[in-house]
Image (cartoon, rainbow, N blue to C red):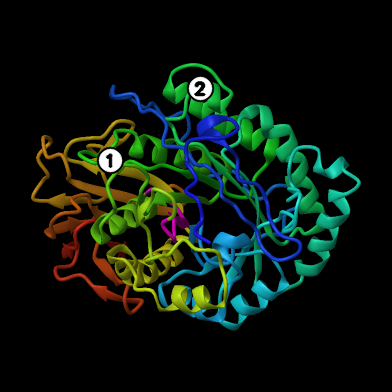
Amino acid sequence: MKKQPISKFSGVRQMWLPMLLTSVLLGAGCNSLRSAGSEPSQRTSLKLTFSGSPAPGRPVGSQWVLGTPITAYYHGPGGGHDRWGPLTPGMAKKLADGGFNLVWGTCVEDLDVAHAHGLRVLMLASQQVKPWLTLSAAGALNDPLRKPMLDALIEQVKDHPAMYAWQVIDEPSVADFSDVAAMVAYLREHDPKHLAMVNLFPTYASAAALGTAGDTVTAYREHLRLLVEIVKPDLLSWDHYQLRKTHDGGQYFLNLALVREAAVKHGLPFLNVVQAVALSPHFRVPTGNEGRYLAFTTLAYGGQGISQFVYWPYSEFKGGISEFTDDNFNAERAKADAAAPLTPLGEALCEIHPEFIAIGTELQPLTSLGAYHLGAVPSGAVGLPTDATFTVVPPVATAQKKGILLGYFGTSGQPTHVLAVNLDYNREINTTVVGPAPLQVFDAATGIWHAASDGARAQISMAPGGGKLLRLR
């Protein structure tokens, strides 16, 4: 039977329906509704409230370790129910070949398949038979039916080598934070080695949806502050979809800057849920070059994870990572899913994901010290300071709309590494990065550092939306 389309923008809380934890019996039908929201058009000037070395980030009781930088997805294999189905060996191989390392799962069998293919699992947690009880919903810990089911699932999966994280909630309001905190604390107490994932609204969500007040910056900054204070997450995660039909939304870098600010202040890693589909006729399908742009800008701001929204394009969504026939899951569809061609974005991610992981691994021991824009400075972003440690020649014209982004990294406040990113996802560029001492350039394909062509001046070529990592020798 053909699945009926599900509108992304209908249901409880309208655009902001949370997607909660999943799986006890087979899989999770997380047909969650995610928001596009309205985006104010005015340019926002962001004044940072924190700079310097991060505070210790691990919440009390947590034993979770980030490990390999995260390459993940929403709405795809392993999500359970009729639409997504279990994680099959064919899809696990396809995901691994596509550079994904964190996949959806709903049961021990999914963990076994993932482990056989070198993958980690984000465990969903809802009952898979009617009445489809959500084990992590508000009050679930006090529910005599749901709590034993959650406890049983924890015991089944907590020691499995493929277990990595629990999906707790998507886009909570501040009003939800106390219940979310209770679930995060409970999971941390009973399974301290695994992440409790909480994904946040974008900046273009209204202050009312966030549960705060004030202008865009004030409301979102307070949302982040309260999340860290009340929920005590191991990782910051949010979604932001800016690739509109005729233009790019104006708050992408503002969102990155605000999350980076909170991440550095509290010593937390962050993951960016990025656009992989046209969510409606008002959006465009991202190209491979735009996928590279989303990955490299995330890295330059200090991110350690990206998640593609969505893997399988369903309902009115167009694009995604792999072609998809939205029929009820069965053995025939399992074969078709594994054999279906990748989209152009999916093909590009086969190269982008390994580069993201390689560069993220090099940067993981370091602190993000700044993200500076050369050329026109987007809303919420920061231009290059006059006493910059690293710069480029020739200079980028201040009127150039898609210039260069320089992400500074180091220890003890001293920049030792810089990730240069080409913000023009339509053309390759060549430039020279200049540092205070001889430089080395990282080859993300081989994992090898090479001496720069001219000592402290490194001539580099950057693919559309791509970048190069350099360090002081």
Q: For the residues carrying marks 2 and 1, which lies nearer the camera in this image?
A: 1
Mark 2 = which residue? 207
**122 lies above or below 137:** below
Mark 1 = which residue? 244
* Residue 213 pos. (x, y %): 53, 17
Q: Which residues are magenta?
A: 301-313
Q: Which quadrant holds residue 344?
A: bottom left
Q: Nearer the viewer, residue 63 or 174?
A: 174
Q: Is residue 143 left or right of residue 448?
A: right
Q: Which residue is found at the position 26% from the left and 48% from the top? A: 405
Q: Secondary structure at mark 1?
A: loop
Q: Is residue 191 left or right of residue 416?
A: right
Residue 411 falls inside the magenta stretch: no
Q: CA distance from mark 2 to mark 1?
A: 22 Å
- Magenta stretch: dominant secondary structure: loop
Q: Secondary structure at mark 2?
A: helix
The local crowd at label 2, few if under 14, some if 14 to 19, many if 20 or more residues have their Cα within 10 Å, is many
Q: Which quadrant holds residue 452?
A: bottom left
* Residue 5 pos. (x, y %): 47, 48
Q: Is residue 169 visible?
A: yes
Q: Which residue is found at the position 62% from the left and 63% from the top? A: 80
Q: Is residue 161 visible?
A: no
Query: Which quadrant holds the C terminus?
Result: bottom left
Q: Nearer the viewer, residue 324 or 396?
A: 324
Q: Give amino acid for label 2.
A: Ala
Q: Residue furthest right?
A: 144
Residue 308 falls inside the magenta stretch: yes
Q: Residue furthest top?
A: 214
Q: Nearer the viewer, residue 394 or 161?
A: 161
* Residue 394 pos. (x, y %): 8, 50
Q: Which quadrant holds residue 280?
A: top left
Q: Nearer the viewer, residue 79 or 62?
A: 79
